[in-house]
Amino acid sequence: MRILFITPDYPPIVRTGIATYVHSMARALVRAGETVHVLTYETEGGAPDSVDEGVHVHRRRIRYIPGVRRVLECLPDEWAKEHLPQQAMTRPGRRLGLGFTSLVEAAQLGAEFDVVEVPDYFCPGWAIAAARRWPVLTVLHSPLDIEFRYSNLPNRTYLRAARGTERAAATLSAGISSPTRIIRDELLDMGWRTVARATHNPIGIELATHSGEAVNPQSSRILIAGHITPRKGHDILARAVGHLTRSGRRVEVLCVGSYGLGYWGGRPFREHLERELLRAGCPWTFVNHTDRRSLQELYGTAEVVVVPSRFESFSMVALEGLAAGKPVVVSDRCGVAEQIPQEPEGGGIWVTPTDDDESLAMALDHVLGLVHQDRDAIGTAARSLAASFGNVDALVPGRLALYRRLA
C-alpha cells in the first residue's frame, strides 16, 4: 500500500506523542513492505526531502494567505491581545493554513496514496478530506477541545472557531481510529457525535530503540515529560513530592517539556506551579523539548517515570518509560491504563487515582523502595509489560487491515 502520514512534528525534534507514534509506525510499515511518506511541518533537523529507514520524509513550511499578517500588524495592540489568539495552538487560521498546505504539498509529491493518516490535533487533513482526493483516517490523540476542558482555557470566539474546525474535520474523514476507549468516550461526552463510528486500534513504539541498559541512573530521580499545562498534572506531582520531602525521603524531579497554554484560578498555570514548587521544597530541573535520542538518554537517568495527568488519551511517555526498563506511575485517567492487566506480574506500572497527590506520593515511595531493593527485576518487568501491548511491529497487521477497509 501507499500510505501518507501528516504530523505536526517529526524526529529528530519531538514535541508531541504524535511524532513518536508516527515515527515508529511509519518505519514498521516499511519493514512490512509498504511504501510510506511522511509530510511534516517541523522543518528543523532535516532536509526538505529525505529518506529515513525507508520512509520518505517531506518537511514543508505552512502556507499563509498573502497580506493577512500585514493587516493583523496594523490592528491596535490592546484590541489584538483581547480578540486574537496569541499562540499558534489556538489559531483557527493556523488550522485552515495547515489543511490547504497539506492538500497542495501532498499533491505535489507526485504519488497516489491509498490512505492518508492525520491526527485530530490541528486537523491538517481537512482539505484533503473535503476534496475527496484520498481517503483520510483521523486518529484521536487530544484535540483542542480536550485542552480547553482540562487546562481551563478562556471561552473566546477564536477558540470556539478552532475547536469547531477540528470537530468538522473529523466528520469529513473517511474513517476515525481511537487508540483507547477513554478518548473516544471523552469526546462523545463533549458532543463529538462523529467519534461514535471510531474503531479501536492500539498504538505502539519501536521497543528496540529503548532497549539499552540504563545509563547513570540518578538516585531517586523522578521524570515527567510533556507540555507543562494543568491537564498534564505537574502541580499534582509537585504536591506529591512535597509529601515525600516532608516524610524524609529525598527525591529530585526532572521535567522535560515547555510551558503551554493553561490557567489556574484565573491566572497563568505557570504562576500556580511555581507556588507549588516553592511549597514542595524539592529539587526540580526543567529541560526543554529535545531530540529523541537525548530524551531516551534522560529516561536512562531516572529511577521512575510518572504521568500524573488529569486526562491522557494514551501516554507515549508511559510506554517509552516501560520500554526503557523504568517503573511507571500513571493516573487512572491515562488511556495506557486500559492496556494493562489489573495487577501486572512483577509490577512495572502502578495506577493511582487522578488528582490525588497523597496516593501518588505513596505509590512513588513504594516504587522507589522496590527499585532500591532490586532494580534489575523491576526493569525486566517493565520491559516485558511494554512488549505485551506496545510493540509497534505486532500492531502492523491490524493497521493495514484498517487502511484496506478505507482504501
Image (tube, rainbow, N blue to C red):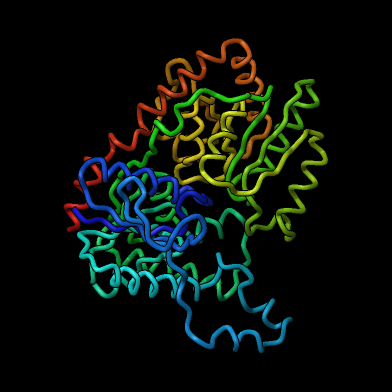
231 vs 65, nearest the viewer: 65
What residue is at 50 percent from the left and 55 percent from the top?
A: 45
Query: Residue 174: x and y, percent?
Result: 25, 62
210 vs 255, nearest the viewer: 210
237 vs 324, nearest the viewer: 324
What residue is at 69 percent from the left and 34 percent from the top?
A: 253
In the image, residue 163 above or below residue 393: below
Query: Residue 295: x and y, percent?
Result: 56, 39
What residue is at 72 percent from the left and 82 percent from the top?
A: 77
290 vs 321, nearest the viewer: 290
In the image, residue 95 above or below residue 289: below
Query: Residue 270: x and y, percent?
Result: 73, 53
In the image, residue 129 above or below residue 237: below
What residue is at 56 percent from the left and 15 percent from the top?
A: 375
Residue 236 visible within the image: yes
Query: Residue 195: x and y, percent?
Result: 34, 57
